[in-house]
Amino acid sequence: MTVQTQLQPTSRWQKFWKRPTKPYIHPYAGGILLGIVLFTAFFLTGNGLGASGGLNRFVVWVQDAISPQHVDTTPYLLKMAGGDKDPLDDWIVPLVIGTIVGGFASGWFGGRLKIETNKGPRISKRQRWFFAFAGGAIMGYGARMARGCTSGQALSGGATLSVGSWLFMFAVFAGAYALAYFVRRLWN
Amino acid sequence: MTFPLNLEALFGKPIMFLVFGLIGFAFGFVLESSGFGNSKKLAAQFYFKDMTVLKVMFGAIITAMVLIFLMVGLGVLDYNQIWVNPTYLWSGIVGGLIMGVGFIVGGFCPGTSLVGMATGKIDGLLFVLGGLFGIFLFGETEKFFDNWWQNSGYLGRFTLMDWLKVPTGVIVLAIVVMAILAFFAAEQLEKFFGKRDLTKEPKKRAFAAIALIGLAALVILVGTPTTEQKWDKVAAVKEPVLENRDVQIDPAELYKTLYDNRLKLTLLDVRNEADYNLFHIRGAQNVLLSEVKSLVPGMLAHTASNGVTVVVSNDEATATQAWKVLTAESVPNVYILGGGINGWIDKFGKDETIIQKVNFPVPDDQLQYIFPAALGDRYECADPNPIENEQLEFTPKIKLQMKRDKSGGGCG
């Protein structure tokens, strides 16, 4: 009896978190839905979507907390956090937090919440972690240089027909395809 | 009501942040549902096995684009108030190439790594940490190439329509058709490299393609609203502004603004060339009323948050017409020189005896002065002496209105 009463809440707990795994939605359905989200963002707010800009503000927020003087003397950081400016006081910050929560909710709904490492079959987990970190660093650097990432430049600028964003998009695909063959061991 | 809304002014900051939070939620939800939390699925794009990245990305771009320009065409949405990523040619291309490398090495892009992390993918978490580190590095090293980053290939708000000089609808339709051809090619590649059975693909996708092409064709049919139509939409709000004389600034205020380093003044003289050659305020740019509209893309391309535009005619009638054009096209902070050039000379030209005021009535918006020669801005009162005019009394009217967050959109 005692064993059962102990188990029952655990299993209900487990049931809540381990929903049956659903397949991903069809890419075209995903594209249309994402397009509607992007349109809604522009229609209501005049702004598109973004991610790296929000992450940037978290980085600068930490930098500002550690060394406000350094922030005040670096022009690039000054724009976001100079003086008494709060780097987190920007629309992109709630957007990024919403993205994380939304991703989590969808993962829960589709039964895809799982601690795991996705990698190609020929590399170890540790190698994958190393390359994920390295790739992230390269991507973060490039995204700030390009003033936006796939969401902020390619999606938002693409839909509003910015010349720079279209060229940027081709550059991203060119960079990735050019290198893909040489790093095929990572994924295949 | 015109969209986009100024959420902060309408509902306050908490509601604005809530709206962005909800948009973010939907964004994350769709990304994860499409499989973008899984780095293997993302990387497969670059080995032609699974073209989900291309399909979702271009699917989203064309869907949003068609809806945006349909709403713009119908006059519901104001394109000039929408954030269009400014074009910085070279930093965009180099940054894009670097990002491509990061994409294939790390298996994510910033947005997708967030949903990867949120669903427990350790590689997603490490990518996010790496991304934060890369962003930190950029902030610390930007100073070494600041000039290149800020200026190289800078074109401001530069759209495909500005570049190709083709109507919006034609570009929208061409992009939709190209995207659908790309989808077709992508499916063939998946069949070849990924051994995907295309017969199992939903037939409905053909209807979606036709619907998108139809909507894009509708964008061409609807066209883009003319300046007159745009004015009609805002007239109810803007006519009272003119009647209250909220935007007709005193000559003294214009004079002070010429010397105000905090403001970036554009002075547009909308009179005919003959009058301009006779006399104009120093620094004024001559542009005919009929050509004012052609300045709009340039003015929107390089809007500084401290930019002020003042339009000038002999009295106010032509300047008011120009003001209506610029205001209808959403150019921010436009003012009219109250009393025009005649009022300016009344104020600053009292002692300049070679300029004679005529003693017979002249029609409205004509020069009331006679000039001995077409000296342009070489008359004394074209550039009044700052020492003599240190003290001037006027009611200040210039108020900078930033219509939207200057840090703008995208990944600002």
Image: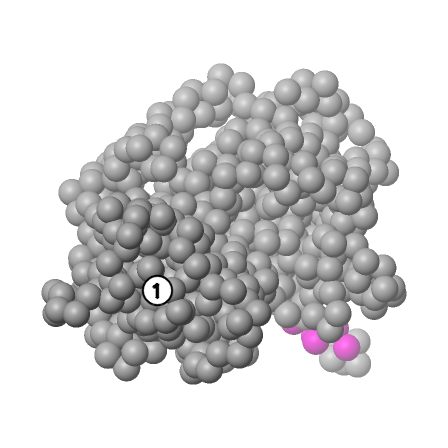
User: Is B404 covered by the magenta stretch?
Assistant: no
Magenta region, mostly helix, strand or loop? helix
Q: Evaluate whether residue B3 shows in this view.
A: no
Give the left or right position of residue A154, taking residue B40 as reference. left
Using the image, determine if residue A47 lies above or below residue A127.
below
Residue at the (43%, 41%) spot, across then down? B158
Q: Position of residue B60 (x, y in %)?
A: 42, 44
Amino acid marked by disc 1: Thr
Give the quadrant of the N terminus of chain A: bottom right
User: Is A8 covered by the magenta stretch?
Assistant: yes
Q: Position of residue B233 (x, y in %)?
A: 21, 66
Residue at the (74%, 27%) spot, across then down? A186
Q: Report the span colored magenta.
A: A6-12
Q: Evaluate whether residue A66 shows in this view.
A: yes
Residue at the (31%, 33%) spot, across then down? B165
Residue at the (35%, 54%) spot, across then down? B280
Q: Position of residue B115 (x, y in %)?
A: 63, 53
